Image: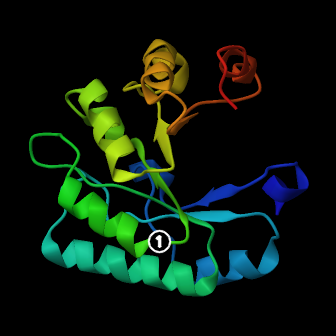
Amino acid sequence: KAAQDGGANRIELCTDLSVGGLTPSRDVIETVINEINIPVHVLIRPRGGDFVYSKEEVELMLDDIAFCKKTGCSGIVSGALTIGNTIDEKVTRQLIAASEGMDFTFHRAFDVVKDPSEAIETLMQLGVTRLLSSGQQNKAIDGIEMLKQLKSLSKGKLQIMPGSGINSENALVFKKAGFE
């Protein structure tokens, strides 16, 4: 409610930020959807740690996406990597297909890929709507040069959304760099 009242045009809903964010409970998702009027994008991540998921974890993620779609969420924030820290195209394609009709944001798993240029090409080919990234640093302000490069590489086909540590003291740096 505070984000909506403060002028936000959408929110990302998650829990457990101390581990990088996890999927919130279904009760929380329903409550938020019923209480606010701005688009809600739900993080789909079953556990902390790496972004390499078992078959069972992928099934849980797909079930969570189906619930979000049924509940009226506007978007999903998710993604998967291979053991070699490249985009797991097969799993990400499944997540995107399950999200049909909703925006799909690839999350900060991107910040550990071994080749960001290759990874952004893969995401564009997969049809991802947006990339949430800190420019492969802990805080986006420290990764701003990488974020600018990603923005250039995306050629407007994919929105680059800086995330992590953006606040009232540094927000204008991102705005001046051309980020919304």
Q: Is residue 15 above or below residue 122?
A: below
Circle 1 packing at 10 Å, graded few (<14), some (14-19), many (20+), is some
Left or right: 62 in relation to 56: right
What residue would you read off at disc 1? Answer: 100
Q: Is residue 46 visible?
A: no
**Which is more toward the observer, 73 or 157?**
157
Along the viewing direction, whichever of 19 and 29 lies nearer the viewer: 29
Q: Is residue 147 visible?
A: yes
The colour scheme used to paint the residues is rainbow
Tell me where residue 36 sits by quadrant: bottom right
Q: Taking 137 as reference, is 109 above or below it? A: below
Q: Quadrant of residue 59?
A: bottom left
Q: Residue furthest left?
A: 84
Give the x, y percent position of residue 156: 55, 32
Q: Quadrant of residue 48?
A: bottom left
Residue 127 in percent (x, y) is at 41, 52
Q: Height in image: 123 above or below 23? A: above
Indicate the amino acid at tag 1: Glu
Give 123 or 10, whichever is nearer the viewer: 123
The reply, left or right, for residue 28 in relation to residue 63 is right
Residue 136 spot, x, y in % from top left: 37, 26
Determine whether, in the image, residue 24 is placed left or right of residue 92. right
Is residue 5 toward the left or the right of residue 42 in the image?
right
* Secondary structure found at label 1: loop
- Residue 14 location (% of width, % of height): 54, 62
Quadrant position of the N terminus in the picture:
bottom right
Above or below residue 142? Residue 116 is below
Residue at 38 percent of width and 42 percent of height: 124
- The residue at the point 9 percent across, 47 percent down is 83
Question: Residue at position x 68%, y 15% from top?
Answer: 173
> Where the C terminus falls, by quadrant?
top right
